[in-house]
Structure formats: structure tokens, C-alpha cells
Image (cartoon, rainbow, N blue to C red):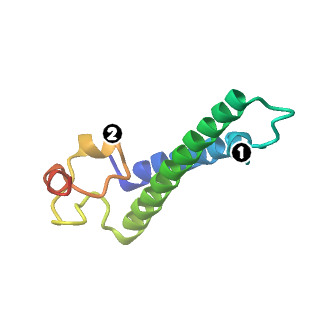
Amino acid sequence: MQGDNYRQLLIDRQKELAELAAAADEVRRPVLLDQTSVGRLSRMDALQSQAMALEIERRRNLELLRIDAALKRIDEGEFGYCVVCGEDIPEKRMLFDPAVPTCVDCARRNT
């Protein structure tokens, strides 16, 4: 697969993540602590949903950073090479996650 094809996959994923972020705005809003309008269990449930939404947002932002870095590597002609050891990243690995920055061996060493 060519760099332009990977670029398009990465851009499509960026758009998808932006749409998901826009759809999740409602859940991330602060939870009202007024017990007259919301019961304790409902409030606890809302707080848990908010915490989960914030974690999902954090992970989404990390993925966007990885995508930006991959697009930069494409522009610089470094895409497809491990950022740690410089070896080729197998195409199957890049097809699974085009934003992946390392080969399998280096990824194993860092976990």
C-alpha cells in the first residue's frame, strides 16, 4: 500500500473521531448536584457515565495525536519505519493500525 492510501485511511479515522467527539458532548457536561431534581443513585450513575466519557475522550485524543504523528511521518518520508529501531514495520501491522509508530519487537520491549 502507498503512503497516499495510508494518508487517506488516517484522515478518514480523524474525521470519524471528530464526529464521535461531537456526539459525546452531552455526556461530558458537568453533573448537577441538586438532589431535589435528581436522586442520589441517578446522580451516581450520571457521574460514572461522565467519568467513562472523559476516559474515552482521553483515549480519543491520544489516538488523534498518534494519527497526527503518522501524517507527519508520511510528509517526511519516514512512514512505515519503526521510530525506535528504524526497521520496516510489517504491512499487516500497518493495515491494522496505520498510526502505529513501532515494529512488533520494539513494541514488546516497551510494554
- Residue 77 visible? The answer is yes
The mark found on residue 9 in the picture is none
Residue drawn at x 20%, y 47% as measured from the top left: 90
The part of the image, by quadrant, that contains residue 12 is: top right
The mark found on residue 96 in the picture is 2
Q: Amino acid at mark 1?
A: Asp
Residue drawn at x 47%, y 60% as measured from the top left: 65
Q: Is residue 109 left or right of residue 2?
A: left
Q: Is label 2 in a helix, a strand or a loop?
A: helix
Badge 2 density bin: few <14, some 14–19, many ≥20, Cα 10 Å = few
Question: Mark 2 or mark 1, which is nearer the start of the sequence?
Answer: 1
Q: Is residue 37 left or right of residue 49?
A: right
| Near-viewer residue (96 or 45) | 45
- Picture coordinates of residue 73 (x, y %)? 37, 66
- Label 2 near label 1: C-beta < 8 Å? no
- Picture coordinates of residue 95 (x, y %)? 33, 41
| Number of numbered discs visible in the structure rendering | 2
Residue drawn at x 14%, y 56% as measured from the top left: 109
| Residue position for label 1 | 25
- Eyeballing the image, is 24 above or below 105? above
Q: Is residue 70 left or right of residue 50?
A: left
Badge 1 density bin: few <14, some 14–19, many ≥20, Cα 10 Å = few
- Residue 12 visible? The answer is no
Q: How far is mark 1 from mark 2, CA to CA?
A: 28 Å
Q: Is label 1 in a helix, a strand or a loop?
A: helix
Q: Amino acid at mark 2?
A: Phe
| Near-viewer residue (18 or 28) | 28
